[in-house]
Amino acid sequence: MVIEHFRNGDPRPVYERFRTRGRLAPEGLTYVNSWVTDDLTRCYQVMECADRRLLDTWIAAWDDLVQFEVLPVITSAEASARVQ
């Protein structure tokens, strides 16, 4: 799970870059889904990859516009299996 905090609380530069250049994700990094807060200051995004370096490459392409928090997550089914 990636939590994006738009720098200066401004999502416009992010959406402008996305429109002109796309997601900028390296091959092997898969976008799953995302949700943006109602006040347009944060985005909660699920990305999937086997190699953390791919995620770091993607983050570097957006770091000037976004502050990132990365939280490794598992599915509820995986969590249930672990606690059994």
Image (cartoon, rainbow, N blue to C red):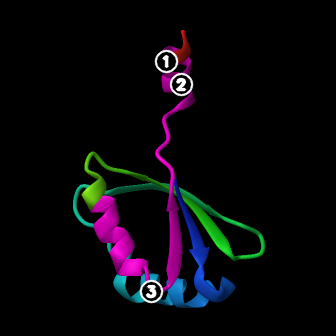
Kindly tell me whether residue 25 is visible in this rendering. no
Which residue in the structure is indicated by mark 1? 82
Query: Is 69 a magenta residue?
Result: yes
Q: What type is the residue that disc 1 sits on?
A: Arg
Which residue in the structure is indicated by mark 3? 64
Q: Residues within 10 Å of mark 2 (few under 14, many from 20)?
A: few
Query: Is 49 a magenta residue?
Result: no
- 41 and 20: which one is in front? 41
46 vs 26, left or right, is right
Which residue in the structure is indicated by mark 2? 79
Q: What type is the residue that disc 3 sits on?
A: Asp
Callout 1: helix, strand or loop? helix
Rounded to the nearest whole Å, what is the CA distance between mark 2 and mark 1? 5 Å
Kindly tell me whether residue 68 is visible in this rendering. yes
Determine contact: label 3, label 1, CB under 8 Å: no
Give the residue displayed 45% in from the left and 86% down from the top. 64
Determine contact: label 2, label 3, CB under 8 Å: no
